[in-house]
Image: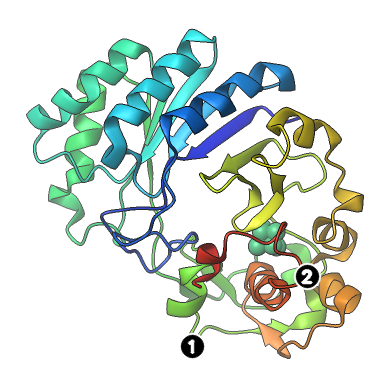
């Protein structure tokens, strides 16, 4: 049951993190217009199950007036609202309060702040800390997101992984992380990746929407394009089994996807997402409606 809609308000970000799975950067484009955002919001009640509307990116605070207006409208429609930000704007606690207070007054339910070595080298004095302290002072519900550089741990992850190295750190090997962070990590045979470990592609609980109309089930894996047909209609008609990419992934993970389309592939991958991302990249021109936008694949 789809309960969460996440606006990728823009792909533009002030940072260019190595682990970013949507290839955001200061040069990235793809920003919602107010008209587009309102069009999407007007579709949400028709889906009937939506509870949450999130604003993220890229960096949504780069488009503060648009984000503010989106939160105002969504809140007025009765949805709970949230934001994900890197807190680039929090020069001090006092300044952070200036940015946050209007959002608190709008009734934002949740704010998640990136606070890790990818975003800030010195965590003790980071902008994120200023923002976190300011949210607490303002009585806002807030959490931090911390992702570390990949590490190889000798531990045991799951029963079937017994004795195999576990990659720690929480990086998802999609997007720029595949280009920047894969080198030197241990790999496993491709046949082992027979399921999608993170997304419930059959019954998704949340999707991410971008200004190009893509309805992301996972980054770069789209349910369809909401500028071609109404969002509510696409969501209601979605059936993973008849989706050309999700069908095989649900059936047998990335390993099934390569067999389905006879994709040339490597012998070993770091994890299922690493394999899935590269196989999807190879299928991009064949399924442009479902594997989009190209910028999420670094193109
Ligand atoms: S990259 Fe593929 S395997 Fe990983 S979560 Fe996304 S859909 Fe699932």
Ligand 1 is located in which of the four quadrants?
Answer: bottom right
Residue 231 versus residue 52: which sits nearer the camera? 231
- Which residue is label 1 attached to? 184
Q: Which residue is drawn at 78% across and 70% down?
A: 254
C-alpha span from label 1 to label 2:
22 Å
Side of 84 relative to 254 (left or right): left
* N-term-proximal mark, 1 vs 2: 1
Look at the numbered disc 2 and give the secondary structure of its residue: helix
Task: Answer above or below: position of 49 versus 123.
Answer: above
Quarter of the image where one finds residue 3? top right
Element under disc 1:
loop
219 or 109, which lies in front? 219
Closer-to-camera residue (251/278): 278
Label 2 C-beta lies within 8 Å of the nearest ligand 1 atom: yes
Give the left or right position of residue 16, taking residue 76 as reference: left
Whole-percent x, y for residue 57 in the image: 42, 46
Instruction: Report which quarter residue 256 is drawn in.
Output: bottom right
Identify the residue position indicated by label 2 in the image: 254
Residue 249 visible, this angle: yes
Q: Which label is found at residue 45?
A: none
The local crowd at label 1, few if under 14, some if 14 to 19, many if 20 or more residues have their Cα within 10 Å, is few
Determine whether 199 is above or below 153 in the image.
Answer: above
Disc 1 vs disc 2: which is toward the camera? 2
Residue 31 place in picture, x, y as percent? 41, 45
Asked whether residue 172 is in view, the answer is no
């Amino acid at each position: 049951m789809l309960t969460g809609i996440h606006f990728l308000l823009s792909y533009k970000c002030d940072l260019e993190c190595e682990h970013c799975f949507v290839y955001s950067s200061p040069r990235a484009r793809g920003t919602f217009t107010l008209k587009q955002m309102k069009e999407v919001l007007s579709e949400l009640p028709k889906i009937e199950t939506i509870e949450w509307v999130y604003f993220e990116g890229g960096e949504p605070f780069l488009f503060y007036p648009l984000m503010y207006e989106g939160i105002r409208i969504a809140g007025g429609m009765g949805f709970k609202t949230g934001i994900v930000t890197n807190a680039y704007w929090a020069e001090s606690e006092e300044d952070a309060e200036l940015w946050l207070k209007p959002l608190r007054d709008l009734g934002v339910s949740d704010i998640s702040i990136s606070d890790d070595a990818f975003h800030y080298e010195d965590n003790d004095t980071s902008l994120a800390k200023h923002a976190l302290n300011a949210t607490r002072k303002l009585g806002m519900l807030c959490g931090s997101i911390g992702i570390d550089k990949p590490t190889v741990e000798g531990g045991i992850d799951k029963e079937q992984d017994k004795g195999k190295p576990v990659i720690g750190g929480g990086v998802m090997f999609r997007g720029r992380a595949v280009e920047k962070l894969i080198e030197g990590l241990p790999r496993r045979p491709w046949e082992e990746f027979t399921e999608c470990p993170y997304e419930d592609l059959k019954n998704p609980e949340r999707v991410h929407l971008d200004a190009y109309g893509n309805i992301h089930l996972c980054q770069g894996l789209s349910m369809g394009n909401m500028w071609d047909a109404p969002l509510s209609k696409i969501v209601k008609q979605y059936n993973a089994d008849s989706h050309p990419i999700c069908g095989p992934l649900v059936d047998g993970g990335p390993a099934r996807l390569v067999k389905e389309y006879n994709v040339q592939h490597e012998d070993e991958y770091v994890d299922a997402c690493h394999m899935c991302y590269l196989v999807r990249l190879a299928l991009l021109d064949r399924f442009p409606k479902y594997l989009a936008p190209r910028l999420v694949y670094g193109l």
